Amino acid sequence: IRIFTSWCASDTEGRLVLKLGRDFVLLVNDGLSYARVEAQRSTSLSISSESVDSTVKGDNWRDILQGAGINSAQITLSGVASNSPMYMLLLSKKIAREHIDCRIDDTVGAFLVGIFKIVSIAASGTHNGEETYDIVLQSTGLFGYPTAGNAWQWDSGDDVLWDGGDMVLLESA
């Protein structure tokens, strides 16, 4: 079994620390700062990329071209619907077909950041229960994840540094 420790928090002695699901949350930039979407019960993140088949006739094994294909990220969340400012902001952005600047946080801090399209917002409820929502977001371009210090690795391969809210290119791929 191989464990990727760069994705896991560790204590001062280098031991892996388990993360709580309740700390894995979506935050949306409301124009002033990143604010948490209230009443989240479930948040999931999927990062995927298409493969480019470069197999030639006569080869016995499939050959996938390294570094090719389109990367994408999808965020899915669900929770209890309300008239909270962040829920209403997401609803208005969906109706206006506007993209949102958001990030996923966990116990360590920001986990992934980027611009996302609100693919769908669904609400449902039962007679004896609360009204719930399901929201699906799809990345619209580059997205980044933290590496060392204050640096971020973008899916383009560029390393950037956050400097007072602005991205500064450290190294281009």
Image (cartoon, helix red, strand yellow):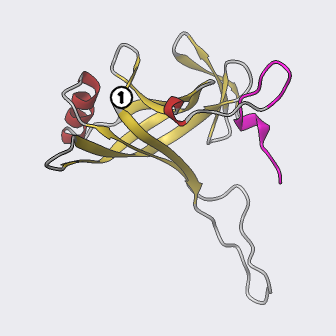
Q: Nearer the viewer, residue 93 or 46?
A: 46
Choose top left, top right, bottom left or bottom right for residue 39.
top left
**Any part of residue 52 in sight:** yes
Q: Is residue 172 left or right of residue 89?
A: right
In the rendered image, the quadrant that contains the N terminus is bottom right
Circle 1 sits in a helix, a strand or a loop, which is it?
loop
Does 147 appear above or below 134? above
Q: Residue furthest front?
A: 128
Residue drawn 25% across the image and 43% down it: 132
Q: Position of residue 70 (x, y in %)?
A: 56, 55
Give x and y (percent) for residue 151: 68, 23
Image quadrant assignment for residue 108: top right
20 or 70: which is nearer to us? 20
Residue extending furthest toward the bottom: 58
Camera-side residue: 47 or 114?
47
Relative image position of residue 23 (x, y in whole percent): 52, 29
Q: Which residue lies most toward the right here?
A: 13
- The quadrant of the rendering that contains the C terminus is top right
Taken as a whole, is the magenta stretch helix, strand or loop? Answer: loop
Q: Is residue 4 magenta?
A: yes
Position above or below: 2 against 152: below
Residue visible at 77% across and 22% down?
Answer: 11
**Number of residues whose C-alpha sits closer than 10 Å to that of mark 1, classed few (under 14), some (14–19) or many (20 or more):** some
Amino acid type assigned to the residue bearing label 1 in the image? Val
Residue assigned mark 1: 37
101 left or right of 95 in image: right
Tell me which residue sits at (18%, 40%) in the image.
95
The stretch in magenta equals 1-15
Q: Looking at the picture, how far across and down is residue 82, in whole percent?
A: 21, 31
